[in-house]
Amino acid sequence: MTRYIVRRLLLMVPTLFGVTVVVFTFIHLLPGDPAALMAGNDATGEAIAIMQHELGLDRPLWTQYGIYVSELLRGNLGVSLRDHDPVSAHVGQAFGPTLVLTVCAMVVAITVGLTIGVMAAVNHNRFPDYAGTSLAMFGISLPSFVLGLALIWVFAVELRWFPTGGYHGPSTLVLPAITLGMGAGATIERIARSQMLEALGQDYVRTAKAKGQRTSVIVVRHVLRNALIPVVTVAGLDFGNLISGAIIVESIFAYPGLGRLLFDSINFRDYPQIQGIVFTFAAEFLMVNLLTDLLYARVDPRIRYR
Amino acid sequence: MRLPRFVTAFSDSPGGVAGAVLVVLVVAAACLGPVVAPYSPNVPDYADALQPPTLHHWGGTDEFGRDVLSRVLYGARISLGVAGLGVAAGLLAGILLGLATGYYGGRLDDVVMRIIDVLLAFPGILLAIAMVAVLGPGLQNLVLAIGIFGVPGFTRLVRGSTLQVSGMDYIEAVRAQGARSSWILLRHVLPNIMAPLIVIATLRLGGAILTESALAFLGLGAPPPTPEWGAILSDAKDNLVTSPYLGIAPSVTLVITVLGFNLLGDGLRDALDPRLRM
Amino acid sequence: MCTRWWLRWLAGCIGFALVVASSPGPLSAAGPKILTVVQSGDASTLDPPHEGFNSGSAVDRSLYEGLVAFDVRMKPIPVLAQSWSISPDGLTYTIHLQPGVTFHDGTPFNAQAAKVNLDRLRDPKEDPRYALFDMISQVKVVDDTTVQLILSRPFSALFYNFANPDITMVSPAAMAKYGIDGLATHEDGTGPFTLVSWTKGDNLVVRRNPRYWKPGQPYVDQIVFRDVPDGTQRVAMLKTGEAQFVFPIDPAGVKPLSGDPSIRLIKGPSILVQFVGMNLLHPPFNNRDVRLALNYAIDKQTLINTLYQGYAQEMHSFVSPLLPGYKAVGSYPFDLNKARELLREAGYPNGFTATLWISNVTFQQRLAVFLQQQFAQIGVTLKIVALDGGSLYALENKGPGENTVQMRISGFSPSNGSTYWQFHVVLSKAAWPPNGLSNFSFYENPAMEQALDAALRTTNLAQQNAGYAQAQQMEFDDGAVIWLASPTNIAGQTTNLTGAYVVPDQTLTVQSAQLH
C-alpha cells in the first residue's frame, strides 16, 4: 500500500511539471504589461521601464521559467506583481474560504444525493423514484450560475433570509454551498440509486426479506456498505469538479476565495499569481484524485493495489 | 442489422424519447430562430426598456428595450453552433489520437498519454478559462477551448477500444493478408466504438453548452452585442433587483437544452449498450 | 461497525465546516465606536505613492497626511502645511509646517522629515508619479518647521498636486527600517489612525492614534474598510446596518434605499468625465467634421437614462465644472441631420466602419452596445473588441506608427483636481504613447498647449482662468474626443454618521467622521 502511494506521488511529479510548463506558456502568451499597470495611468515610459526591471520582466523567457521552477521547488510560489506580497500568502488566505465552501458543498451533495438516491431505489418504480430521478436529471442540467441567481433572487433579495454574498458567518455559506453542491448531488443520486438497485436485487436481500427482516434494516445493515463504494469514487471525482465549479459560484456570490482571486489576477496581469493559483488548483485536483483512489481501496476490500 | 433493435430499445426509454424531442425542438429553434423571432435581437427601443413580460414581449425587454425572447432564439444558433463545433473538433482530434496511440503504441503513446494527463490535471472549466483568457474573446477561441476540453475523454475511449481490437486474432489475420493499417483501423476498429462514442459525444454536447454559457456569463465569450445565453444571463444578473424576470427566458431555454442532450445521451446509452449504464 | 464510518465522516465534515465558518474575524465588535466603510475595492499597498486604486485613498487618508488635502469641493486645504507663501516670480515656495506632529513610531515630523519625503516623491525610482513634481529642482530646509521649494519653472497648480491623498508624509525612520518593499506592508504616517490588521480582498482595520495632533480627533475608535465588489451586497450591508458608509451605490440600488428613514443617500457631482477617444492618426478620425458628426449623433439624454439610470450630467466642456478655470464652452445637442450632413461634407455620405476597443467591465460593454446603436443611425458601423485591462493598455500604449486602436471608451478624473493636468495627460503632445501617458488620440494642438502653459506660469487668477477657458474652447471646436457624460457619485450612509464624504474624484474621506 505504501509503495502504491509513493509510486502515485512520484507519477504526479512529471504531470505537475507539465502543468507548470502549460501555465507558464499560457501566461506569457497573454498580451499586456503588468509593469505598466502597476505604475499607474499617470506614469511615463521611463517609470514603466524601471518597474519592468524591478519585476524581472526584462529577462529572457527561459530564464524566467527556470527561476520560477527553482523557486517552486523551494515552496516559493513567487511574489505578486500587484503588491509585492508572496503569492503563497494570497493563495493561503483565499484557499481557506474555497476549501470551506467546497467541503460544505460536498456535504450538501452527499447528504442530499444519498438520501434521495436510497429513497428512490427502495421505492423503485413508484412516485419517489420518479421524483428523485427527475430531480437529479434536472440538477445535472442546471448550470450553477442559473441556480445561484435564482437562489439569490428568492432567498436573498425577496425573502431576505440570507445575505447576497461575502464571507462572514455561516449564513453566507448556505446559498453558495447549495449552488455548488447541486450538480454533484445529482450525480451522486444517480450512482447511489443504481448501485442500490443492483444491490437490492441480490439474492441475499431477497433471502433476508423472506426471513422477515424489515427493508430499512436490510438497507442500512447490508446494502449500503456495498453500494457506497462507487459512490465514494464519484464523490471524490466530483470534489475536483467542485473545485473548478467554485470559480463560477464565487464570482456570483462575491465570495473571497481562490476563484475570485484568479479573476482579479487575470484582469491585472499578475503573472506569478495566476501561475500560483492555477498550479494550486491542479495540484489540489491531483491530490484529491489520489486520495479518492486510496479511500476507494480502503472501502472496497476486494481491491488490492500493487 | 443492429438498427431495428436499437430503435426499439430506445423507444422503450421515456427519458430518451423526451430528450430526443427536446433536442429536436431546440435545434429547430436554432435553425428557424431568425424566421420565428418577433423582433430583431439588436434593435433598441429605449422607450420600452426594462419591461416585464407582456403579450408584446413574452420574455420582457432588457435595458436597451431589446426583446429578450428574440435574443434567446438567436442565441440558440450561437450556443448550439459553438458547442457542436467544439465537440466535433474534440471528437475528431480524439479519434485520430486514440487510433494512432492505440494501434501504434510505443513512444507516441507515452507522449500523448502524458500530455493528456497534464490536460486532465486542470479541473473542469479552469482550462477553458485560461485558454480564453490567453487567446482572447471570440467565437473561434471558444470553439477551440471547448474542443480541447473534450480531447482527453475521447482519446482515452478510442485508444482503449483500439487496444482491445488490435489485440484480437482476426486483426493479425487481416494484417498477414497484407492489409494496410489505416484500412484495418477504419474498417475494424471504428465501427466497434461508434456506439459509445455517440453516447459520450451527446453527453459532451450538453456539457459543452454549459461550459460555453458559463464562459459567456463570466465575460469571456464573444464580444457584445452577441446574444449568447450566458451573456444574456449576465445582463440579467446585473438587473436582478429591479428586473428579475430578465433571466427567466434564457434560463429555461438553457436548462431545457442541456436536459434534452443529457436525456438523449442516457437513452442512447441504455439502448446501445446496457453495460455502459452507471 | 464499519458501516457507521461514513456517518462519522459526515458529521466531522459538517462540524468542521460550521466551526470554520463561524469563527469570529476582526469584524466582531471590539471598541465602542466602530465605523464600517464599504468600498468596491481594496487598497493595493500601504505605501501611498504606489497606491493606484481609488479605494486605497480612503485608507491612506486615515493613516497618513500630506502637506494639503482636498475638501469636499476638491479645493486644497492646509493639513501638515499650516501656511505658505509664494514668491512673485512663482519660483520659490516657502512652506510653514504644522508644529507638534509626530509619526506613529514616535519620531517627529519636521522640515527634515518633509525634505526626505519630498525628495522621495521626486525620485523616478521611488515614485511612479514623480512627473507631478519634476518642476521642483530643490528642496531646502530653512528651519525646523519651514521648508522651501525652488522650482525650475512656475507651476500655479502645485498645491493641487500635493493634495492628492497618495502624496503624503511617511516616517523617514520607517523608510530606513523597512525599505521600499517593506513599506507596502508597514504603515507609518502622521494620520489619525494606525493599522490594526489587513486581510486582503476582504477588510482592513485601523484604530485611533492617541498621539494625533488635532485635539479631540479622531472621533471614532476604529474604522473597518470592507472590500465588496458586488453592488447588491453593498446595498444590503447598508440596509442591515452592517456598514455606515457605502460607496459607490449603483443606480439600481437607489430605489431599495430610498424609503428607508435610517439611511441617507448622498448624490454629488464627480470630476470624472467619460468620453470616447479616437485615434486621430487613423482616418477618418483625422477629419474634424467626422469627429463632430459623431458627437452630434449621440442622444445625451437617452445615454444618461439608459447607461447611468439618470445619474450623470451632460458635459459642457472637456473638464468637469468643479475644476479650476472651468468654462461652459458649449454642447453638441443630439441632431442626426446635422451629423449626417457633417459626414457628407467630410466625404463619407454612406458612413464608414470602425472598431471600438473596450475592457471587460460591464459598464463599458453596455456603453459599447449603446454607441453601436446610436452610430448605426448615421451609417457608422461599429465593431466591438473586448479585451481585459492589461491587454488593452498594451495596445493603447503603442507608438504612432504601430498603434492600431481606433476608438476607445475612456474617461479622466485628474488625481490632483487640476485642469492643466487633465489636458496634459489626455491631449498634449508630450503624452503621446509610448511614453506612458494617456494621449492615445495622438492629438496635437500647439496653440492649446501655449494657452495652458501661460495659465500655469502666472500667479494671477484671472489670467489662469483665461488660459484654461481658451484651451477648453479649442477642444470643443476641434471635437478632439466624443463627449459622453460626467457620472454622479452616489453614496449611502446611515443617518447617525456625520463628517464622512465622497470627494468628487471618487475617493472617500472618512477619517474625521463622527458616529452619534
Image (tube, rainbow, N blue to C red):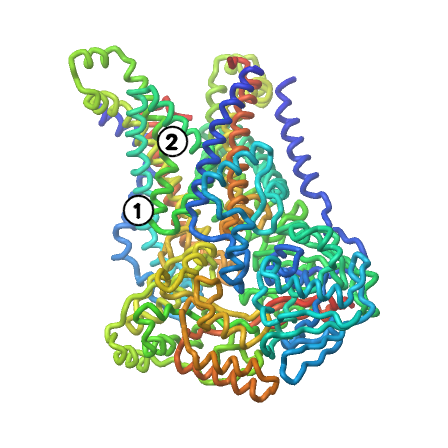
- Could you tell whether A275 is left or right of B203 in the image? right
A215 or C417: nearer the eye? C417
Where A145 falls versus C420 (above or below)?
above
Residue C491's image quarter? bottom right
Q: Chain of mark 1?
A: B
Circle 2: is it few (<14), some (14-19), or many (20+) Cα within 10 Å? many
Of pointers 2 and 1, the one earlier in the residue sequence: 1
Residue holding disc 1: B81
Residue holding disc 2: B152
Q: Are marks 2 and 1 in contact (CB under 8 Å)?
A: no
Secondary structure category for the residue under label 1: helix
Q: Amino acid at mark 1?
A: Gly
Q: Cα distance, mark 2 to mark 1?
A: 21 Å
Q: Residue extending furthest bottom?
A: C462
Q: Amino acid at mark 2?
A: Pro
Residue C133 position in % (x across, y down): 60, 69
* Position of the N terminus of chain A by quadrant: top right
